[in-house]
Image: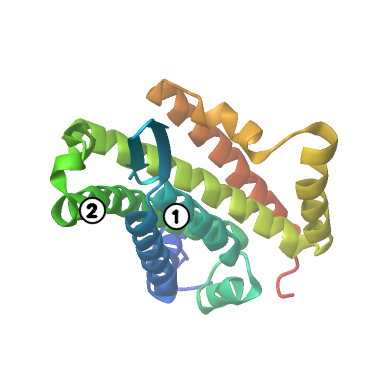
């Protein structure tokens, strides 16, 4: 009989803080991709439209955080997959652990990383506006495009965080499937190519269920339920793996 029984919540907490330190490179990568997206947005804008009539020519360039959010979501997908790799899983053997506590600490890490990504994405999006105001001709900069309320900022952070959690959950689930069998790499590649050609199903169609939702409450419910299903699926898949592979 052991003098001290292992407490699951304590193990999850220790693994969580360990992963915050061990995967500091993920946050460095987040900073890199966001600065890269920030630079691209400032230099070329997020979109452009032009019209002309006789000697009059009008060119409108849009500056928003769409590129920042897209780069952040790609980062979340890769981070979710990274946590399922052998190197990441073997790090848990430094603790008295099991697959369930390991998965819980991974999920806690992804939730924390998603919150940080959501906050920094919205802050960087507003930084685009500030930079363009200071270094552009303000006479041709539409004034209303540079204003944002605290409420709008909060809603933006919440929505971006939820999207990041969803994409990270998808990456984590796919990563677990690939770790279970490398055959899933071929399957997912085939689906990615075949679905748009045969059935006309694109990523836009898949995300329509989420990005066309006008109610923040219903959107939150959709993301939470979908993410829980994906995380639960990943946990079930990990239970089918060998202890060390």
Q: Nearer the viewer, residue 158 or 4?
A: 158
With respect to residue 53, does 190 lie above or below? below
The circle drawn on residue 30 is none
**Which residue is rendered at x = 35% and y = 59% of the image?**
43
Q: Quadrant of residue 12?
A: bottom left
Mark before the other along the chain sequence, 2 or 1: 1
**Which residue is rendered at x = 17% and y = 35% of the image?**
143
Q: Nearer the viewer, residue 34 or 177?
A: 34
Q: Which residue is mark 2?
A: 127
Mark 1 crowd level (few <14, some 14–19, many ≥20, 10 Å Cα): many
Image x and y of residue 207, in percent: 58, 34
Question: In front of the other: label 2 or label 1?
Answer: 2
Q: Image quadrant for the C terminus?
A: bottom right
With respect to residue 30, does 226 lie above or below? above
With respect to residue 126, does 40 lie above or below? below
Q: Nearer the viewer, residue 16 or 60?
A: 60
**Viewed as shown, does residue 91 lie left or right of 36?**
right
**Which residue is rendered at x = 20% and y = 41% of the image?**
140
Circle 2 SS class: helix
Image x and y of residue 163, in percent: 46, 42
Q: Which residue is mark 1?
A: 72
Image x and y of residue 146, in percent: 20, 40
Q: Quadrant of residue 25?
A: bottom left
**Viewed as shown, does residue 106 lie left or right of 45?**
right
In the rendered image, the residue lying farthest to the front is 55
**Viewed as shown, does residue 64 lie left or right of 152?**
right
Q: Image quadrant for the N terminus?
A: bottom right
| Labels 2 & 1 near each other (Cβ < 8 A) | no
Image x and y of residue 92, in percent: 54, 72
Circle 1 SS class: helix
């Amino acid at each position: 009989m052991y003098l001290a029984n292992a407490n699951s919540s304590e193990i999850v907490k220790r693994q969580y803080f360990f992963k915050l330190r061990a995967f500091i490179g993920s946050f460095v990568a987040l900073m890199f991709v966001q600065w890269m997206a920030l630079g691209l947005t400032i230099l070329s804008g997020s979109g452009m439209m032009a019209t002309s009539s006789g000697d009059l020519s009008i060119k409108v360039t849009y500056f928003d955080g769409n590129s920042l959010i897209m780069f952040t979501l790609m980062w979340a997908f890769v981070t979710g997959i990274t946590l399922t790799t052998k190197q990441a899983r073997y790090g848990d053997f430094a603790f008295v652990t099991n697959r369930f506590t390991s998965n819980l600490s991974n999920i806690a890490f992804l939730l924390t990383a998603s919150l940080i990504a959501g906050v920094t994405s919205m802050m960087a999006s507003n930084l685009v506006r500030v930079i363009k105001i200071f270094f552009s001709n303000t006479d041709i900069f539409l004034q209303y495009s540079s204003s944002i309320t605290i409420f709008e900022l909060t809603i933006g952070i919440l929505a971006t965080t939820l999207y990041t959690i969803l994409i990270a959950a998808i990456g984590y689930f796919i990563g677990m499937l690939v770790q279970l069998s490398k055959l899933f790499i071929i399957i997912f590649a085939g689906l990615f190519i075949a679905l748009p050609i045969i059935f006309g199903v694109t990523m836009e169609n898949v995300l329509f269920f989420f990005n066309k939702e006008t109610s923040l409450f219903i959107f939150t419910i959709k993301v939470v339920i979908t993410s829980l299903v994906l995380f639960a699926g990943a946990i079930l898949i990990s239970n089918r793996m060998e202890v060390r592979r």
